[in-house]
Amino acid sequence: MTPESASLGGRPAQSRAPRRRRAVRRVAWWFLAPALAIYVLVIVYPMLAGIWYAFTDWNGLDPDYRFVGLANFRRLAGDPQAVSSLKMTFVFAIAIALLQNLFGLALALALNERLRLRDPLRLLFFMPVVLTPLIISFLWKYIFSTQGPLNTVLAMAGLGAWQLSWLGDPMPAVASIVIATLWQSVGLAMVIYLAGLQSIPAELTEAARLDGAGPWQVLRFVTLPMLAPAMTVTIVNSLITSLKLFDQIYVLTGGGPGYATETMSTLIYKTAFTFAETGYGSAISVVFTFAVAAVVLAALHVLRRREFEHG
Amino acid sequence: MARARGFALRAALLETGMLLTGVVFAFPLYLLLTLALKPQSSWASDPLGLPTQLFFGNVTAAWTQAHLASAMLTSALVVVASTVILVVLGALAAYWIARRVGRLSYGVYLFFIAGMILPFQLALIPLYSTMRELGLLGSPASLILFYPGLKLPLTIFLYAGFIRSLSRSYEEAASMDGANQWQVFWHVVLPMMRPITGTVVILNGVFIWNDFLTPLLYLSGSRWATLPVVIYTFVGQESGDMGLVFGGLLVAMTPVLIAFFVLQRHMIKGFAGGLKG
């Protein structure tokens, strides 16, 4: 850092002053300008506009709308469907993030061993990650249907008591959405953990073994601590993705039965676009945005500290 | 000896366990494939078996009835155009961010990174009215404008991290030889970024190809609908004929499957490495 830029705190107007000849001149503003313009136009400005609409009764079409203060937020707090959606957003996100990491780690540990089927199995578990969630959701919708393959298999296995109305009852519907989402995301956690496992030096686990550590102790005291950065990445990434979960819920249950599987994403879509309540939909989006930011930043904080403690 | 036998037993158990897990995991794909290639009249009597003979009626009927060819072309157009814009603008901006030192460039960096965390739903509602006012609803241009904005945060995050790891000496040498900034960027920096550009293209391309909510809002009902929207409408209309539906699902999945098998190693590397800072 040059002395000038340090003392000026990088203010742009004066930062073109350096007299010292530099091998490479400062990169010009126009490198940044187009990206900044698109980002502001498409994401930042609409977000700020959305915050403004949250305080109005706009219906999305009328040029006339009124500023209504906190009315939309008060309505949200008293709306059992909105409160339940907020809760279910977290239920789905936490369930998916935990299970995706647990299963992803287990698969990575198993497929880090020298198995004959290692490569084809890695490919199989990863493949659904790139498949279109909308298409896969229709497949799962059929699998979970009352006369569908899942209930058929259960009957054949003599598990008739487990035949459920998978998408018609609240608890099975939540489980079905979690299963369908996990099927498409567990491979992502697996490949990140596999990359992490491959970066652990073999001497380290070897040394622990020579010191008399059993397989569980090696896992607990060597492998898992060394995987802490990979864990931060996968947990934060799966929280961000699953908090915004839309396609799977929209196709599998449409938020039902009742509003048992409604989340903020599906509720915002319905409110703003099906019922044309732009103002109220924006208020839900504002709450959603703050909730997501709070959860992700908290998770990052906790996980980063954990990484640090483990050195 | 006993220890060696213990290892062999453990390996055999693990191998069998993983094989069973794989079979269960592959079941949905097996169903999609077998049901799509059987006439629906045989589904009830044989819901889980292999087709006795391959039947392509579902697949061909879905291909023509759902106009899947034109949907795939639209999707490809949106993916290619958006990804090219992302690569060029993202690399330029990341170069600016990574090669400037000081609080300003760090602030700009954080300003972009925030977009990776915050949900875009809040922007979606006002943007819908803006697109309508601009006359872009029903046009793929709306998506080609939207996706670069949405995915610049991830793209800049990837590029900036990579550029910071590159030595400046090549840029300095080119600059001493009289190259201007644009020439340094285009002839020196961009070629060095090829590995991370692969990751940028794969992560963004797969996301854009698969995305459903935004094209549902901006393009549904138009003749420019992307593949997921066309499939959504098709399944809604044909839900009485599940054979046809499964034919459509199978055809719609084929392009991604082909891309996956051609690029499998790059895809896995991109997804495994691209997400970590």
Image (cartoon, rainbow, N blue to C red):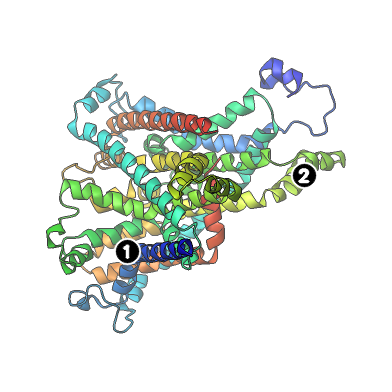
Q: Is residue A54 above or below residue B23?
A: above
Quadrant location of the C terminus of chain A? top right
Asked if badges 2 and 1 are on one and the same chain, I answer: yes
**Mark 2 to mark 1: distance in Å?**
54 Å
Left or right: B271 with respect to A60?
right
Q: Amino acid at mark 1?
A: Val
Quadrant location of the N terminus of chain A? top right
> Residue at 38% of width from left, 33% of height from top?
A292
Which chain does the numbered disc 1 sit on? B
Q: Secondary structure at mark 2?
A: helix
Is residue B159 in sight in this rendering? Answer: yes
> Disc 1 marks which residue?
B24
> Residue at 36% of width from left, 63% of height from top?
B17
- Give the percent coordinates (x, y) of residue B140: 46, 52
Farthest bottom residue in view: B53
> Residue at 29% of width from left, 23% of height from top?
A66
Within 10 Å of disc 2 (Cα), the crowding (few <14, some 14-19, many 20+) is some
Q: Is residue B263 above or below residue A85?
A: below
